[in-house]
Amino acid sequence: MRVCLACFETRLAAVFENASELRLYDVCDNEIRPAGHLPLPSKDPTDTISATLACGADLLICGAMCGRTRNCLESSGLHVTPWVGGSIERVLEAFGANTLDSLVMPGCRNVRRQRGLCRSKGQGLILSRMQHFKE
């Protein structure tokens, strides 16, 4: 299995679309081995999506991600685990121990159960009201 981390310096990028590089790891027999990295000089979301799909990963672990980007990646067959934060080392340790949920960004604990955006109840109410006024 190949795992891809969307990174900024030594941490997961807080927002996938702002990642400066993709770091790749191969997982074999419960051992995680570095498999390379791919710089992302362009901030164009289409370029970032294309690079992510081209890296051959089975799983992407990243920070915040817009719904359209996630849908695009998942519809292409990539499994996405968003809303994770922390240093690369901590994320890899948590992945290996099957405890990534301990690194979920604040306010995003139920995102894995609810398909959709990470937001607090108040924000969701505000966003739904804003949508109502746009219609």
Image (cartoon, rainbow, N blue to C red):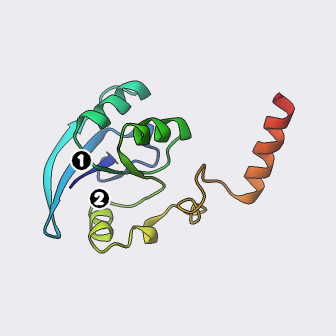
Q: Disc 2 or disc 1, which is closer to the eye?
A: 1
**Mark found first going from the N terminus, 2 or 1:** 1
Against 134, residue 87 (above or below) is below
What residue is shown with label 1? 23
Q: Secondary structure at mark 2?
A: helix
Which quarter of the image is occupied by the C terminus?
top right
Percent coordinates x, y for residue 125 in the rendering: 80, 51
Percent coordinates x, y for residue 86 in the rendering: 39, 61
Amino acid type assigned to the residue bearing label 1 in the image? Arg
Q: Secondary structure at mark 1?
A: strand
User: As drawn, is 58 to the left or to the right of 65?
Assistant: left
The image quadrant that residue 95 belongs to is: bottom left
Amino acid type assigned to the residue bearing label 2 in the image? Ile
C-alpha span from label 2 to label 1 = 9 Å
Q: Are marks 2 and 1 in contact (CB under 8 Å)?
A: yes
Percent coordinates x, y for residue 38 in the rendering: 21, 37
- Residue at the (43%, 59%) spot, across then down: 85
Q: Residues within 10 Å of mark 1 (few under 14, many from 20)?
A: many
- Residue at the (50%, 48%) spot, across then down: 64
* Residue furthest out toward the right: 133
Percent coordinates x, y for residue 108 in the rendering: 57, 61
What residue is shown with label 2? 88
